[in-house]
Image: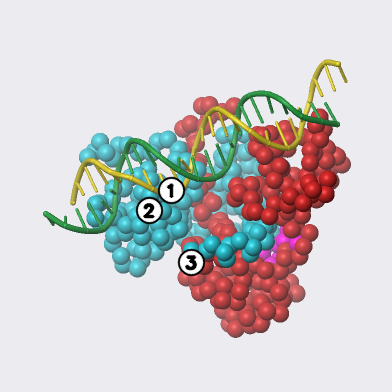
Chain colours: A cyan, B red, C yellow, D green
Amino acid sequence: MSEKLENRPQTRLPDPVIRRLPRYLIGAQELEASGATWVSSVELGHALGLTSSTVRQDLSHLDVEGVSKRGYEIAQLSSALTRTLRADRKHRVVLVGAGFLGRAIALHGDLTRYGFEVAAVMDVNPEIIGTSIGNLKVQPMSALPDAVAREHIDIGVIAVPAPEAQAVADALVAMGILALLNLALVQLKVPDSVQVVEERIVVSLQELAYRLRTSDGERNVGAS
Amino acid sequence: MSEKLENRPQTRLPDPVIRRLPRYLIGAQELEASGATWVSSVELGHALGLTSSTVRQDLSHLDVEGVSKRGYEIAQLSSALTRTLRADRKHRVVLVGAGFLGRAIALHGDLTRYGFEVAAVMDVNPEIIGTSIGNLKVQPMSALPDAVAREHIDIGVIAVPAPEAQAVADALVAMGILALLNLALVQLKVPDSVQVVEERIVVSLQELAYRLRTSDGERNVGAS
DNA sequence: TAGATTGTTAATCGATTAACAATC
DNA sequence: TAGATTGTTAATCGATTAACAATC
């Protein structure tokens, strides 16, 4: 038994799996809140739009064991996911860019609920520097090295206009930050050692616009 | 030649390709702005972190033709991408949820720059209803059917807290909207005929947190 | 011309799904 | 016990990459 627990996922999980884990976690937490105690791979798959096969494959990477005929114990599943995603730790975030989007992020309740704490906010715009966002004061970019060192920052969020994003990324990388969330409409160039995830509303909307166009001719034909 | 132009991509492109198209477009526009006129698949791949093979495969779906020894004419590439993504049209968006995130989206300059126009903003909160965001007034949910009908809405953006998101989605679908951008932390249930794209900052941060943990043991070993 | 680059076919790689023995 | 559900192996599917003839 202690043997079994030893086989922690030391290697990195495949990207598609990683991206599904947060969804499993949210699903598990919802189920937990609803008072359920067991869930099967079929139910879970149904809830997330996956096959039960995919669910079982995914969960087999985790530190949970299902039980024949019953499925997975929700509390245990939830805690295994929490552990794998390190959702029980505080992750400290520095936010660069205090425009509308930056402010929205800093004030977004979901972040704190899931362990992400915005520890510092920077901006280049002198008119914004010094203003308050929640209980943080916007600092000039020159305060970045100090803030990163002091606040033990894990993740940098780039919420500046596209033309400034690369310079900001360079600065964050120079400060030793190894994970960036890029909200700007540019492809950042960073060293391989730095993890980047991109999130762009406009890009998502463009994807939707494309799908919308190609769907109406076809989708309503063979929908199940 | 008119034969060649006829073979428009009537069928839907594979999802991974669709998701790369906006990146090609942004890249092409940057190149265009910089005054370049030709770009090869190798250069494009380098800029976007793709192999030249992938680039050529992707672009072969489009209505562009490259030229041996020169590559693709940037203006032509840009316009083919624009056409495929319908980025030359106005897309009308209804935004539900006028919290920090909703407001940020409504005021985000990139949207209008890329042809997306927020035509109406709704919220449930009586304290928010009636307030202004840019030159839009926040309307009650009851005004939704009217707004959708009148404003010829293409896309719905859901920026409400998770517990309300499904009800909002149901309402939008009932109004005939076929494309949703979901920013809430729930898995929406919608008919197959409705396109959904999800974007969740917390999920992206969780992905980063996971990658961060698994990277520092490994990445700096075999980095190129 | 010689060399670079496309467009496309074939090979590889990886992810999803199916299937099924083990098991509660 | 009989039946449901896991964990895992094998089969399928699809996406990425390699390779190369055509061509400018």
Image depth: mark 1 or mark 3 in front: 3
Disc 3 crowd rating (10 Å Cα; few below 14, some 14-19, many 20+) is some
Residue most extreme to the front? B3
Residue at label 1?
Answer: A85
Question: What subunit carries mark 2?
Answer: A
Main secondary structure type of the part rendered in magenta: helix
**Three-letter code for the amino acid on which mark 2 is drawn:** Ser
On the image, which quarter does residue A46 sit in?
Answer: bottom left
Q: Which mark is residue A171?
A: none
Element type at marker 1? helix
Verify whether residue B106 appears in magenta.
yes
Rendered location of residue B173, percent (x, y): 57, 73
Is A191 rendered above or below residue A187? above
On the image, which quarter does residue B107 sit in?
Answer: bottom right
How many angstroms separate mark 1 from mark 3 (CA)?
Answer: 25 Å
Residue at label 2?
Answer: A52
How many angstroms separate mark 2 from mark 1 (CA)?
Answer: 22 Å
Element type at marker 2? helix
Does mark 3 fall on the same chain as mark 1? no
Residue at label 3?
Answer: B189
**Three-letter code for the amino acid on which mark 3 is drawn:** Lys
**Three-letter code for the amino acid on which mark 1 is drawn:** Leu
Verify whether residue B79 appears in magenta.
no
Rendered location of residue A87, percent (x, y): 43, 51
Which residue occupies the foreground of this view, B132 or A53? A53
| Residue segment shown in magenta | B105-115
Which residue occupies the foreground of this view, C20 or A15? C20
Does mark 2 fall on the same chain as mark 3? no
